[in-house]
Image: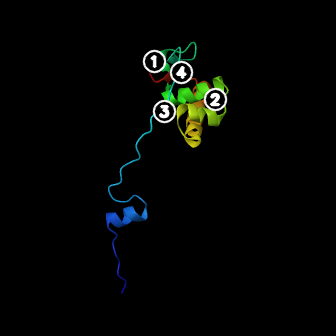
Amino acid sequence: MTLVQEDSEEDVAVVLGLGKNKMPRPFKRRRIRGRPNSFYFKPAGIRMVDLEESVLAKDEFESIRLKDFLGLDQTECAKKMEVSQSTFHRLILSARKKIADSIINGKAIRIED
């Protein structure tokens, strides 16, 4: 005879590393100094109603401005934004992916205000 023991939700949470009543990590504010001259870019000759849109967050815009426009190294960019290098790296990858997707697939780019 085999006994089957059912795990409680608490046991499963502990095994998964979730713990009890664990709050998510608070969002750390990021320093953003640059502002875009335009908040919207679209391919020429395509009506707005026919366009898909990629949204670039403020911190993604700032990462592009610091790294690609000003040419700073990643360590310096992260310090200026007051984030870790790994966080900066994720921001720049996300921003570049959205920009590339927009250019290749003819989407508009909207920068959050």
- Disc marking residue 49: 1
Q: Is residue 58 left or right of residue 19?
A: right
Residue at the spot of label 4: 34
Binning the other alpha carbons within 10 Å of mark 4 as few (below 14), some (14 to 19) or many (20 upward) gives: few
Binning the other alpha carbons within 10 Å of mark 1 as few (below 14), some (14 to 19) or many (20 upward) gives: few
Image quarter of the C terminus: top left
Give percent across and percent down for residue 108: 53, 21
Mark 1 belongs to which amino acid?
Val
Between residue 85 and residue 57, name the one nearer to us: 85
Would you say the residues marked 4 and 3 are in contact, meaning their CB atoms lie under 8 Å apart?
no
Give percent across and percent down for residue 16: 43, 61
**Closer to viewer: mark 1 or mark 4:** 4
Mark 3 belongs to which amino acid?
Arg
Between residue 26 and residue 47, name the one nearer to us: 26
Of the image marks 2 and 3, the number of the one nearer the N terminus = 3
Q: CA distance from mark 4 to mark 2?
A: 12 Å
Residue at disc 4, secondary structure: loop
Binning the other alpha carbons within 10 Å of mark 3 as few (below 14), some (14 to 19) or many (20 upward) gives: some
Residue at 38% of width from left, 64% of height from top?
12
Residue at the spot of label 3: 30
Residue at disc 3, secondary structure: loop
Would you say the residues marked 1 and 4 are in contact, meaning their CB atoms lie under 8 Å apart?
no
Q: CA distance from mark 2 to mark 3?
A: 15 Å
Q: Is residue 21 left or right of residue 47?
A: left
Residue at the spot of label 2: 67
Residue at 50% of width from left, 14% of height from top?
47
Q: Quadrant of residue 90?
A: top right
Residue at disc 2, secondary structure: helix
Mark 2 belongs to which amino acid?
Lys
Residue at disc 1, secondary structure: helix
